[in-house]
Image (tube, rainbow, N blue to C red):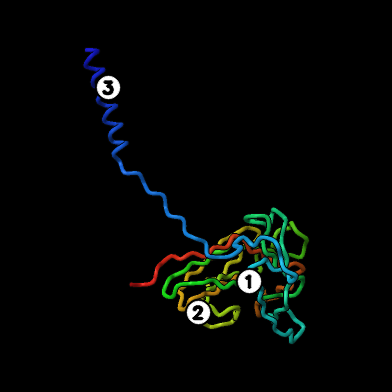
Amino acid sequence: MKKILTLMGLMALFTLFWSMSAAPSAAAPAMQTNLLKNPSFEQPYGGDGNAHDWVRWDEVTPDKFGDCTNGYAKSPQWSAELNPALVNSGSASQHIGNQWDTWHAGMWQNVPATPGSRYRFTFYAQGRGSMDQYPAASDTGLQMNVRAGIDPSGNGGYWYDGDIVWSGSANPHDAWQPVTVEAVATGNQITVYTSANWAVPGVNQCYAHLDVWFDTAELIEVGPPPT
């Protein structure tokens, strides 16, 4: 009887070993190449406060009535953020901010592309609007309108170009949040944009601190040209 039980046990072990070795292993997903230069907004930073390989842009509109509800935009300040609490990856993030004056600005970069291919641009953002010094919490009623953009023809910094495909707006108060957009390239390069817009018409957003941080960007090809 013991011999029979031993034989049955050996057969069960053999069956288990065979099924494990015969089962096909799941293939690891292929790593997609990040096409951006300096995607983590690392140092060195230029004299204008921009991370290398990125270019800054901004909109300037007049304050016609001396009233923030007019929704005017003044040039903000760009700088390297080195506080680890405000860095999502690496050792730095791109900071843009103003005191009291609302602003509309961001960063851009040109990237070689294949016409007809679909690309996905993603970055992480965090923002803060407050009357108090950091680390006081952000006023979540404020709108910073963070968006990601792709110009399929690679316009090289014309942020107002009507061809740009923009994502929806996000308001990532006091926490990192991904913002993403996809577009099909129409030329041999595309231009990607990060954007934040505190200049909201009809709303008084002139706070003592109006800040946004960008970090951990990625541009990947998600679809080849049609054949």
Describe residue 66's horizontal placement relative to residue 38 as left or right: right
Residue linked to disc 1? 107
Q: Amino acid at mark 3?
A: Gly
> For the N terminus, which image quadrant?
top left
Does the CB distance between marks 2 and 1 fall below 8 Å? Answer: no
Q: CA distance from mark 2 to mark 1?
A: 17 Å
Q: Is residue 6 above or below residue 59?
A: above
x and y, in percent, of residue 193 in the image:
58, 72
- The earlier-in-sequence mark between 2 and 3 is 3
Describe residue 34's horizontal placement relative to residue 98 as left or right: left
x and y, in percent, of residue 26 in the image:
36, 46
- The earlier-in-sequence mark between 3 and 1 is 3
Camera-nearest residue between 185 and 67: 185
Camera-nearest residue between 137 and 80: 80
Q: Amino acid at mark 2?
A: Ser
Please tell me which residue is depicted at 39% across the width and 71% down the height of the picture.
225
Q: Is residue 215 above or below residue 202?
A: above
Residue linked to disc 2? 153
Please tell me which residue is depicted at 57% across the width and 73% down the height of the picture.
110
Specify the label residue 9 is tagged with.
3
